[in-house]
Image (cartoon, rainbow, N blue to C red):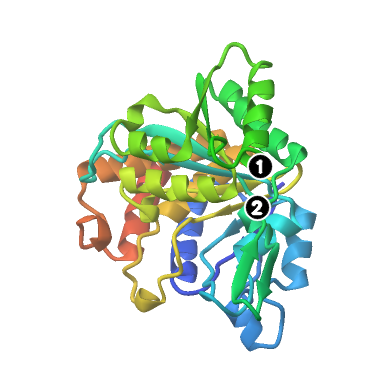
């Protein structure tokens, strides 16, 4: 039986990198029946619909898993980020962002292998804001709960245990934010005691950022609250080549949405020059999630080989291949490896 999954191509370069990714998945021999939804975000709003249409939410709830391309988010005005809406509506509390060296790219470090685990539904992204027009004062509440803290921290430790990773670091600002960040740290200390086989420590967020750009190899799994995790995940992506080559996942107890972490890049949309690497690596994470580990490994190994050889890369990483040429080359490698 085919896997029944939701596909959200997004906008901007989303449809191009999504098409390239589906091509590679097909080459790996995974049978997927996609429920495609092209109207989302700005496209939906232009048609008088909500940015996150109800049929999209219904599809994901019915199928359990979605693959999503980038969707443009207005800055400072307009509709709330579709990404944030999906995470909150579907309670996708764990944002998982690996940062792994791709040999062949010119980056500051050549042996980074770490994962950021970001709480995805509360903190400063809870959307609890107030504005006093009389005094021109804006307030934003960072809501931290024991339940929200425990489930993301436990998710991180369970992931580390399941994937033979031996070190968890908790990022916080409890020296200043003694109640909110202090609660997150207290819960982390309690949960860590249940996993004695996994080394555990904590770092103040600003000190952690400094250490990550000096010696990232000392870190393995890092768990943090929403805003800190958002910043850390982009920082660590920069250590290994940028957002164009790093994957991401949003996972809850029953549902999951796998999405490329980069933007929609409308300035290059339709030009066949976008790099589909992040989306393809995201799809590999998705395949692991739906119990297709061999296909996931085949795709990642073929992708890593392409980067090591450097013959067919897109222009953002030093090559001259188009999106389609990159997808064709990778699909050929994947199909060949599967046949073997």
In x, y percent, where is residue 122? 68, 51
Residue 213 falls in image quadrant: top left
Numbered disc 2: secondary structure: loop
Numbered disc 1: secondary structure: helix
Of all residues, the one furthest to the bottom in this rendering is 47
- The dot on residue 180 is 1
State whether residue 45 is above or below residue 90. below
**Residue at image x 59%, y 48%?**
226
Whether residue 58 sits left or right of residue 28 in the image: it is right
In x, y percent, where is residue 194? 69, 16
How many marks the image carries: the answer is: 2
Of all residues, the one furthest to the front in this rendering is 135
Mark 2 highlights which residue? Answer: 142
Q: Residues within 10 Å of mark 1 (few under 14, many from 20)?
A: some
Q: CA distance from mark 1 to mark 2?
A: 8 Å
Depth check: give the residue in front, 215 or 338: 215
Task: Check contact, mark 1 vs mark 2: CB within 8 A.
Answer: yes
In x, y percent, where is residue 285? 53, 42
Depth check: give the residue in front, 41 or 287: 41
Depth check: give the residue in front, 170 or 14: 170
Whether residue 145 is visible: yes
Whether residue 55 sits left or right of residue 37 in the image: it is right
Whether residue 10 sits left or right of residue 253 in the image: it is left
- The dot on residue 258 is none
Whether residue 97 sits left or right of residue 191 in the image: it is left
In x, y percent, where is residue 145? 74, 42
Residue 41 falls in image quadrant: bottom right
């Amino acid at each position: 039986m085919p896997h029944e999954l939701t596909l959200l191509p997004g906008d901007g370069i989303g449809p191009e990198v999504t098409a390239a990714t589906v091509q590679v998945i097909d080459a790996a021999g995974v049978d997927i029946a996609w429920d495609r939804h092209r109207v989302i975000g700005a496209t939906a709003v232009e048609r008088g619909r909500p940015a996150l249409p109800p049929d999209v939410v219904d599809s994901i709830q019915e199928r359990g898993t979605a693959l999503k391309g980038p969707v443009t988010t207005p800055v400072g005005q307009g509709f709330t980020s579709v990404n944030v809406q999906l995470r909150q509506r579907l309670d996708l509390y764990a944002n998982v962002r690996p940062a792994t060296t791709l040999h062949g790219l010119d980056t500051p470090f050549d042996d980074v292998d770490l994962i950021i685990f970001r709480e995805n539904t509360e903190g400063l992204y809870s959307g609890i804001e107030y504005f006093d027009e009389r005094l021109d004062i804006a307030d934003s509440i960072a809501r931290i709960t024991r339940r929200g803290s425990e489930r993301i921290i436990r998710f991180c430790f369970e992931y580390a245990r399941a994937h033979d990773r031996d070190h968890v670091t908790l990022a916080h600002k409890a020296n200043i934010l003694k109640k909110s960040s202090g609660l997150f740290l207290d819960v982390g200390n309690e949960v860590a005691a249940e996993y004695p086989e996994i080394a555990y420590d904590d770092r103040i967020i600003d000190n952690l950022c400094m250490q990550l750009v000096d010696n990232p190899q000392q870190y393995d799994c890092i768990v943090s609250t929403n805003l800190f995790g958002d910043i850390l995940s982009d920082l660590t992506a920069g250590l290994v080549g940028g957002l164009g080559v790093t994957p991401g996942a949003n996972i809850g107890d029953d549902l999951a949405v796998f999405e490329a972490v980069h933007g929609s890049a409308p300035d290059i949309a339709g030009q066949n020059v976008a790099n589909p690497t992040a989306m393809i690596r995201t799809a590999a994470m998705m395949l692991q999630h739906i119990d297709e580990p061999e296909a996931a490994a085949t795709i990642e190994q073929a992708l890593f080989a392409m980067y090591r050889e450097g013959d067919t890369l897109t222009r953002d990483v030093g090559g001259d291949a188009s999106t389609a040429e990159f997808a064709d080359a990778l699909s050929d490698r994947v199909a060949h490896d599967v046949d073997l």
